[in-house]
Image (spheres, rainbow, N blue to C red):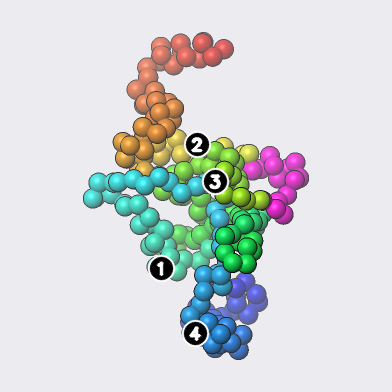
Amino acid sequence: RHLSPVGRLLNRTAFEFAMKHSPRNKLLLEEKGGLFHESDLLKVEIAGIKTPPHYNCPNHMEQEGEWLRRLAENRTYVSCQLLSRRTTMTNNDNNMNDSAAICHIQYRPPGLSLFRTDLAESLVRFGRASVSSSGMHIQDATISTKTVDGSTNIDTIRSDASYMDKLSKAEFEAVKKMVGMWSDEFVRMERPDLVEEAKFEATAGVLQRLWRWLRKN
């Protein structure tokens, strides 16, 4: 939903009616045979996380992608803070740059919640996504990408590091509780470091913890 003053004043029904009947959108639809194209949409990448590997959950548990689909079906309101922009060289005929906005995204949970919740942290905390090992901006060696327009301010970099640390702690809690993708044994086998640490936290006695501390120090 557009965050202009008019967009804020209109309710959802009125806003959608105005967008549907705006002269510009009518012209675009006529040019494209009455259908919107994927290129008409803003592509958004959630900072700090990546798509989890395919996993299987018991039938009584939330299934892969179910929670995000439910958010979309409920048309949940979100707010985005633009951090940077990723450009990708595509293989189409025009060889144009395909751009995506890298953002912090917050959403308002259903019910009477007064405060927004960080989407990335929610996804990680319940085993719905993985923490990116390359930091806030995922680096994919298989494709040619370039991240631009990001801040180089030292305070911003420190804030990003603190945020990634928070996501890592949330992921560790998900591993310990075996929720989402961490309930799949094959996924757990791919991250033995996290799994072993989680087992140690859950089962280690006082002497074992003391011995580890002495070895580290």
The Cα atoms of the two marked residues, 4 and 1, are separated by 28 Å
Q: Which residue is mark 1?
A: 74
Mark 3 or mark 1, earlier in chain: 1
Q: Kindly identify the amino acid type of the residue bearing the numbered disc 3.
A: Thr
Q: Nearer the viewer, residue 137 or 39?
A: 39
Q: Are marks 2 and 4 in contact (CB under 8 Å)?
A: no
- Residue at 57%, 12% in the rendered image: 217
The Cα atoms of the two marked residues, 2 and 4, are separated by 49 Å
Q: Which residues are magenta?
A: 147-160
Q: Is residue 58 one of those drawn in magenta?
A: no
- Residue at 50%, 47% in the rendered image: 50
Residue 142 is tagged as: 3
- Residue at 50%, 53% in the rendered image: 119
Q: Which residue is mark 4?
A: 33
* Residue 136: % across, % down: 60, 45
Residue 173 visible? The answer is yes
Q: Is residue 118 left or right of residue 158?
A: left
Mark 3 surroundings within 10 Å by alpha-carbon count, few (fewer than 14), some (14 through 19), many (20 or more): few
> Residue furthest toward the front?
93
* Residue 36: % across, % down: 51, 77
Q: Nearer the viewer, residue 49 or 174?
A: 49
Q: Kindly identify the amino acid type of the residue bearing the numbered disc 1.
A: Asn
Q: Kindly identify the amino acid type of the residue bearing the numbered disc 4.
A: Gly
Mark 3: secondary structure = loop
Position of 15 relative to 88 (above/below): below
Mark 2 surroundings within 10 Å by alpha-carbon count, few (fewer than 14), some (14 through 19), many (20 or more): some
Q: Which residue is mark 2?
A: 169
Q: Nearer the viewer, residue 97 or 48?
A: 97
Mark 2: secondary structure = helix
Residue 146 is tagged as: none
Mark 4: secondary structure = loop
* Residue 193: % across, % down: 44, 27
